[in-house]
Image (spheres, rainbow, N blue to C red):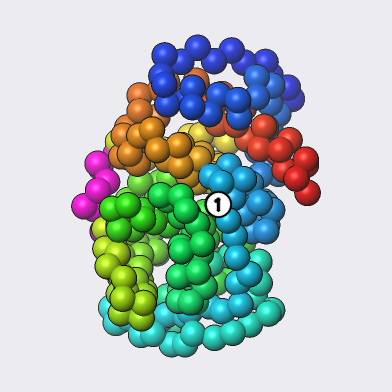
């Protein structure tokens, strides 16, 4: 890819028109590299601005552990040292154990009730012990339908952190949440709402100049942004994005990334 490209987007799709002002006609590879390494506090500034979400002061985290197919609720603890770190689903290949750190139940409740929007978005990062890799995903809470879905731009989550593991953690967490606050949210398993390969937006089989695993953070922002407009449902958004030719979708993603970096500079 050239250092700077000029693109012309001629997409006959209303889905892109909703966010057209957030797509730059100019982009560089540098912006994509910068965005893929954004710390949580910077990423959340963009997320909250794009989806009009009010953030809170997080003071507690819940910790859950999975070993031998058994989920154990470990603790709900207060902390100042973990502020502005990722909510993380962590795998230890030596101990054969998964750990899930997420906002504490009271903080999650406060985040939901202080936002008047239909949707609430909670970013989750995957991590593996002793490996310098990460993967950005998103919890999408629908306050109207009282449902919770887990969005992974790779489609059905696979690898050492599978959709089954994600489902176990989130179902357990929100079951405790419901009991604690008398709520009736339902976590929907990934396989129940995903439409096989039609829901894959990333693919590591493509080269770095194309849509790849390095675009996971921007895809979580883009999907959150689109669904927050309440023009289309999550499944329909993914289906429509997959109808776009890869070359045009790459231009959209890169132009969206470029604009996001520019917007971040204005708000920091």
Seen at 47% across and 53% down, the residue is 116
Magenta span of residues: 189-197
Q: Residue at x 67, y 58 (%)?
A: 41
Q: Quadrant of the N terminus?
A: top right
Where is 223 relative to 128, above or below?
A: above
Please rate how many residues cluster around mark 1, counting C-alpha atoms within 10 Å: few if below 14, some from 14 to 19, many from 20.
Answer: many
Query: Where does the image place residue 167, in percent across and percent down from the top left?
Result: 31, 65
In this picture, is 214 found above or below 79?
above
Q: Is residue 170 rendered to the left or right of residue 88?
A: left
Q: Position of residue 242 (x, y in %)?
A: 37, 29
Query: Circle 1 is placed at which residue position?
Result: 53
Residue 144 visible, this orientation: yes
State the residue in front, 126 or 266. 266
The residue depicted at 54 percent of the width and 86 percent of the height is 77
- How many numbered marks are there? 1
Q: Is residue 201 above or below residue 15?
A: below
Q: Is residue 220 left or right of residue 22?
A: left
User: Element type at marker 1?
Assistant: loop
Prevailing SS of the magenta stretch:
helix
Front-most of residues 217 and 75: 75
Q: Nearer the viewer, residue 230 or 121?
A: 230
Q: Give 67 or 89, whichever is nearer the viewer.
A: 89
Residue appearing at x 55%, y 52% in the figure: 53
- Check if residue 244 falls in the magenta segment: no
Magenta highlight on residue 190:
yes
Task: Tell me residue 91's x, y (percent).
Answer: 46, 71
Q: Is residue 67 visible?
A: no
């Amino acid at each position: 890819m050239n250092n700077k490209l000029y693109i012309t987007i001629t997409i006959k799709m209303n889905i892109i028109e909703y966010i057209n002002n957030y797509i730059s006609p100019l982009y560089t590879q540098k912006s994509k590299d910068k965005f893929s390494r954004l710390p949580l506090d910077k990423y959340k500034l963009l997320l909250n601005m794009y989806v009009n979400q009010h953030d809170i002061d997080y003071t507690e985290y819940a910790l859950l552990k999975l070993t031998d197919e058994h989920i154990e609720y470990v603790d709900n603890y207060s902390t100042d040292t973990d502020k502005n770190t990722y909510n993380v689903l962590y795998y230890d290949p030596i101990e054969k154990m998964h750990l899930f750190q997420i906002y504490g139940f009271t903080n999650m409740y406060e985040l939901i009730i202080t936002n008047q929007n239909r949707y609430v978005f909670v970013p989750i990062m995957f991590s593996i012990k002793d490996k310098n890799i990460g993967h950005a995903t998103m919890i999408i809470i629908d306050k109207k339908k009282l449902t919770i879905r887990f969005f992974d731009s790779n489609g059905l989550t696979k690898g050492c952190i599978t959709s089954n593991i994600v489902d176990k953690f989130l179902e357990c967490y929100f079951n405790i949440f419901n009991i604690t606050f008398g709520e009736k949210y339902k976590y929907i398993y990934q396989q129940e709402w995903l439409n096989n390969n039609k829901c894959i937006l990333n693919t590591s089989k493509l080269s770095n100049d194309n849509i790849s695993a390095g675009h996971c953070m921007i895809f979580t922002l883009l999907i959150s942004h689109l669904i927050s407009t309440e023009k289309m449902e999550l499944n329909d958004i993914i289906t429509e994005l997959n109808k776009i030719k890869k070359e045009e979708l790459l231009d959209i993603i890169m132009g969206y990334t470029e604009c996001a970096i520019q917007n971040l500079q204005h708000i920091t």
